[in-house]
Amino acid sequence: MAQTIVKFDQVSKKYGNTLAVSEINLEVEAGEFIFLVGPSGAGKSTLLRLIAKEYPPSSGKIFVFEKDISKIKSSNLPFYRRKLGFVFQDFKLLDDRTVFENVAIALEVRGHSDEQIAKEVEKILKLFEIWPKRNLFPNQLSGGEGQRTAIARAIIGKPDILLADEPTGDLDPQTSWGVIQLLNEINSWGTTVMMATHNVEIVNTLKRRVVSIRDGKIIKDKKEGRYEIH
Ligand code: ADP
């Protein structure tokens, strides 16, 4: 049996009077690739942000790496977050740093040496085919290049879990496929991937586990699923 890496146990989250997710039970095994699908406002982002411990659930428990994350002290939160990679819309690249520097930050905070950072960043930027753009700033990049830089930053620290919220949201179909191939590859190296998306074609082609969310509830959960929100 594979290890359960994320577990939601009767989790609800309210923002004021809005019930964003309601009594969620969900288990994710280490190494899985999961799509979270559902209409805008369904609660997909909230589930990912709860795992990131951006805020606590209003009720219920969340276990990550088999530990109740409500027990993580704020002083230990950075260590916890370093095991996760985030590709969130509001977790943008830093405008005043180059592509290289934006990716290097992820290793700087982990205390790697300059030499190690130079080597690792070069490796990933070449793999993601953005090495020629390494000295450019985010506003000089295409949408796809920016997104590949964001994913490079999210995964260079070899996270156990990658949380991606609409990573292909603003991209054209071809660029979106490039991003998906990268996520697939990262997953094949052992990282668990949880991705919220509206992209029907990608979900239906990949035939991975699909968790459908509507009005804050899981309405379907299928291995080798399709994009279904009804
Ligand atoms: P999705 O990612 O599926 O679009 P969200 O998780 O972002 O859905 O939102 C779920 C519900 O929670 C929506 O009704 C949304 O308006 C509400 N919501 C999300 N974030 C906040 C917030 N920071 N403050 C208030 N309401 C929020």
Image (cartoon, rainbow, N blue to C red):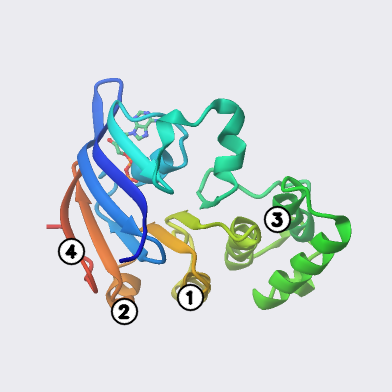
Which type of secondary structure does the marked residue at label 4 adopt?
A: loop
The percent coordinates of residue 107 (x first, y second) are 73, 53
Query: What's the residue at 67%, 77% (across, down)?
Result: 127
Among the two numbered marks 3 and 2 on one chain, the one whose residue lies closer to the N terminus: 3
Left or right, 144 with reference to 127: left
* 3D distance between C-alphas at marks 1 and 2: 17 Å
Quadrant location of the N terminus in the rendered image:
bottom left
Which type of secondary structure does the marked residue at label 2 adopt?
A: helix
Query: What's the residue at 78%, 48% (across, down)?
Result: 111
Mark 2 crowdedness (10 Å alpha carbons): few <14, some 14-19, many ≥20: few
Question: Is residue 216 in view?
Answer: no
* 3D distance between C-alphas at marks 4 and 3: 35 Å
Residue farthest top in this picture: 16
Q: Disc 1 marks which residue?
A: 188
* Front label number (1 vs 3): 1
Disc marking residue 228: 4
Mark 3 crowdedness (10 Å alpha carbons): few <14, some 14-19, many ≥20: many
* 3D distance between C-alphas at marks 1 and 3: 28 Å
The kind of residue tagged 1 is Ser
The kind of residue tagged 4 is Glu
Disc marking residue 3: none
Q: Foreground residue, 30 or 86? A: 30
Which type of secondary structure does the marked residue at label 1 adopt?
A: helix
Query: What's the residue at 48%, 75% (across, down)?
Result: 188
Q: Disc 2 marks which residue?
A: 205
Q: Disc 3 marks which residue?
A: 138
Among the two numbered marks 2 and 4 on one chain, the one whose residue lies closer to the N terminus: 2
Which type of secondary structure does the marked residue at label 3 adopt?
A: helix
Question: Is residue 125 in view?
Answer: yes
The percent coordinates of residue 57 (x first, y second) are 33, 30
For ligand 1, tell me if the residue under mark 2 lies within 8 Å. Answer: no
* 3D distance between C-alphas at marks 2 and 4: 13 Å
